[in-house]
């Protein structure tokens, strides 16, 4: 019998005592014995279970002053589905994107795909997600270019999410769009209305039309895999009936008011860019009765509630959110696209700031190490001894671990890979 694991609020440094890795470690083998899983899902399980353990190696930090300080750090798996491995990736991404931020306000748009298409999406993730990116971005830019009040090219970042708070399969796209754009003749910046970008219903209709047209084309070209729960759609009359039904359905699309201060954009973006389906902080307990975790209470905004799922169902839901290998889930369009990022984007920035455009280009900064990045964000210097302030040197753990094996149990404090 597996003992119940729960959070301990008084635990050292607030580290969670029950993690996603514990659940896969305790139940992963049983899950794989009963449920079919592809190589991608199996790799995610292996990586999460091995993350920051002796299995992935590591190093020992030793004080050069000889004060006796030692710190053992195990390597991270670096899998983008692992909740332990996203913070530094997020910081690096936000740091790199800061140079391309326009000094203007931004709108947040959310496009949601009807749940009737979930079976199709699960069997055709790459094609389905590509269609959502293409339909949403093209529709937004098309409307911004033709909307009488705007007629400009905006800067757009799109971020794919596939989950709801209870780990259900909920495919939606977050689009962060500048509150205005570069005029089509490229000579001025045109700001949008303070609380209005484009007409929400018009945008939803264009997204719906482009997405369903693309899906219908893929069906005609036999590019869709329709098996399991989507197998009934192999019958063309049934498939086209579903398409007609979805064309008459109002798609959920929300445009949120712009941020009050453009400087808040990247702290806001950080909540979306490198998220995984569930963080360790939300998992409260795991044991024979299931996995208990925290979710937002939509009936009472600003509050939370707990739900419990059987471990098998919890793992099944989590693994539905595994992305295809190498899939790009953050993409840039309009002024942020590669075509304009080094030309029209810089012109737009100069026009907004009312600066001359003939200034010498900014010298690209050199890439920072994870140690430098951590110090800049947290103020904590991992290269200095916390006991005497001396410099630390690193030594390989390979020979060290061969000698002591599992006798030594130390908890790593951060991602050191």
Image (tube, rainbow, N blue to C red):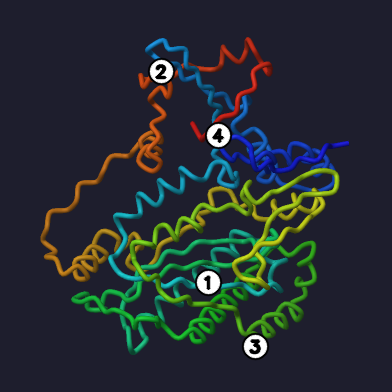
Residue 355, position as x, y percentages in the image? 14, 66
Q: Quadrant of residue 4?
A: top right
Q: Is residue 39 left or right of residue 13?
A: right
Residue 14, position as x, y percentages in the image? 59, 40
**Residue receiving disc 1:** 110
Q: CA distance from mark 3 to mark 2?
A: 65 Å
Label whose residue precedes the other's in the sequence (3 or 4): 4
Q: CA distance from mark 1 to mark 3?
A: 20 Å
At horizontal 59% and vertical 27% (from top left) the residue drawn is 56
At horizontal 67% and vertical 80% (from top left) the residue drawn is 243
Q: Quadrant of the N terminus?
A: top right
For mark 2, give the secondary structure: strand
Q: CA distance from mark 3 to mark 4?
A: 48 Å
Number of the front mark, 3 or 4: 4
Residue that extends furthest to the right in the rendered view of this protein: 1
Mark 3 touching mark 4, by CB under 8 A? no
């Amino acid at each position: 019998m597996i003992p119940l694991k729960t959070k301990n609020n008084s635990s050292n440094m607030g580290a969670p005592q029950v993690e996603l890795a514990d659940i896969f470690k305790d139940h992963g083998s049983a899950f794989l014995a009963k449920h079919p899983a592809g190589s991608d899902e199996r790799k995610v399980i292996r990586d999460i279970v091995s993350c920051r353990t002796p299995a992935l190696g590591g190093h020992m930090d030793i004080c050069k002053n000889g004060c006796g300080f030692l710190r053992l750090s195990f390597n991270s798996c670096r899998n983008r589905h692992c909740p332990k491995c996203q913070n530094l990736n997020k910081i690096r991404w936000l740091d790199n994107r800061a140079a391309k931020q326009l000094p203007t306000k931004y709108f947040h748009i959310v496009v949601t795909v009807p749940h009737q298409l979930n079976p199709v999406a699960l069997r055709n993730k790459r094609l389905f997600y590509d269609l959502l990116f293409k339909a949403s971005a093209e529709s937004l830019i098309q409307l911004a270019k033709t909307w009488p009040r705007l007629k400009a090219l905006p800067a757009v970042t799109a971020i794919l999410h596939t989950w709801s708070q209870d780990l259900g399969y909920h495919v939606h796209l977050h689009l962060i769009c500048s509150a205005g754009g570069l005029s089509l003749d490229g000579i001025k910046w045109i700001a949008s209305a303070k609380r209005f970008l484009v007409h929400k219903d018009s945008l939803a209709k264009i997204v719906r039309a482009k997405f369903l047209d693309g899906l219908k084309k893929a069906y005609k070209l036999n590019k869709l895999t329709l098996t399991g729960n989507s197998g009934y759609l192999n019958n063309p009359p049934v498939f086209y009936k579903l398409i007609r039904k979805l064309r008459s359905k109002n798609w959920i699309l929300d445009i949120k008011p712009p941020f009050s201060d453009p400087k808040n954009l990247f702290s806001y973006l950080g909540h979306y860019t490198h998220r995984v389906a569930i963080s360790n902080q939300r998992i409260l307990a795991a044991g024979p009765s299931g996995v208990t975790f925290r979710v937002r209470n939509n009936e009472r905004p600003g509050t939370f509630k707990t739900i419990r799922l059987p471990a098998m169902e919890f793992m099944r839901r989590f693994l539905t959110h595994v992305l295809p290998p190498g899939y790009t889930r953050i993409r840039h369009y309009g002024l942020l696209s590669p075509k304009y990022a080094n030309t029209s984007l810089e012109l737009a920035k100069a026009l907004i700031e009312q600066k001359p455009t003939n200034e010498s280009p900014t010298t690209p900064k050199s890439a920072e190490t994870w140690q430098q990045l951590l110090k800049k964000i947290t103020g904590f210097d991992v290269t200095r001894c916390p006991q005497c302030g001396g410099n630390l040197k690193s030594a390989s753990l390979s020979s060290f671990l061969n000698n002591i094996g599992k006798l030594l149990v130390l908890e790593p404090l951060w991602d050191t890979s």
